[in-house]
């Protein structure tokens, strides 16, 4: 079957439009899929904290960005020592606050390949430490270095992204 020249031109335009729309839809779908998962180039997201002594997961901390700074709160506790634990050893505004929902890190700003200038609260001791963060293993591991005075006098924890 043969189409007149003007109908062929209209058919080509329709096909070109459909192909372009399909390409844009595929691109938008791909973008949506990419944006669903956490960015492995940023600490923003959920992290499993690991007990140094036992190697077991202690909690899930949710790190979020607000005004260019990173903040983290405890989202889930695993095997707490008592039901509904609070930060009874903390001082000031965090004293006796529930651990779930407690902000345990704040004020981190990106500084090259790491995030620095922040502080971290250890709810087991109530102490607040200066700290910096760095991603490792392609963004699946977070190195958190807490210290007093200088980074040499501190401790490093490694947190893992949940799978």
Image (spheres, rainbow, N blue to C red):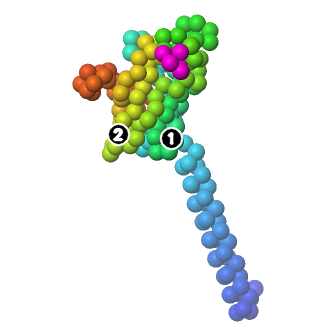
Q: Is residue 84 above or below residue 45?
A: above
Around disc 1, counting alpha carbons within 10 Å, would you say few (fewer than 14), some (14 to 19), or many (20 or more)? some
Q: Residue furthest front?
A: 92
Q: Residue 6, position in %: x, y? A: 72, 92
Q: Main secondary structure of the magenta part?
A: helix
Mark 2 and mark 1 residues within 8 Å of each other at the beta carbon: no
The residue shown at (64%, 62%) is 25
Residue nearest the observer in this picture, 24 or 132: 132
Residue at image position (74%, 88%) is 7
Sequence order check, earlier mark of 2 and 1: 1
Residue 128 seen: yes
**Residue 109 appears at what percent x and percent y?**
40, 41
The answer to whether 113 is drawn above or below residue 20 in the figure is above
Q: Is residue 9 magenta?
A: no
Q: Residue at x 44, y 18 (%)?
A: 122
Q: Is residue 163 visible?
A: no
The residue labelled by disc 2 is 114
- Specify start and end residues of the magenta stretch as a single range: 91-95
Q: Which residue is mark 1?
A: 65
Camera-nearest residue between 160 and 7:
160
> Quadrant where the N terminus lies?
bottom right
Does 18 sit above or below residue 133?
below
Considering every residue shown, the one lying at the far bottom of the view is 5
Q: Secondary structure at mark 1?
A: strand
State the residue in front, 113 or 121.
121
Toward the viewer: 6 or 60? 60
Q: Position of residue 13 (x, y in %)?
A: 67, 81
Give the answer, above or below, for where 18 lies relative to 130.
Answer: below
- Asked if the stretch drawn in magenta spans residue 92, the answer is yes
């Amino acid at each position: 079957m043969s189409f007149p020249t003007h109908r062929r031109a209209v058919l080509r335009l329709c096909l070109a439009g459909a192909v372009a729309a399909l390409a844009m839809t595929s691109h938008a779908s791909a973008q949506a899929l990419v944006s669903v998962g956490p960015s492995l180039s940023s600490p923003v997201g959920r992290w499993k904290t690991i007990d140094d002594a036992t190697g077991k997961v202690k909690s899930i901390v949710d790190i979020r960005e607000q005004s260019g700074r990173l903040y983290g709160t405890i989202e889930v506790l695993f095997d707490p020592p008592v039901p509904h634990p609070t930060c009874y050893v903390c001082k000031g505004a965090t004293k006796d606050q529930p651990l779930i929902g407690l902000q345990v890190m704040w004020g981190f700003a990106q500084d090259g390949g790491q995030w620095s200038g922040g502080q971290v609260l250890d709810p087991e001791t109530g102490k607040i430490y200066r700290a910096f963060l760095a991603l490792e293993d392609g963004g699946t591991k977070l190195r958190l270095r807490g210290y007093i005075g200088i980074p040499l006098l501190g401790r490093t924890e490694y947190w893992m992204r949940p799978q």
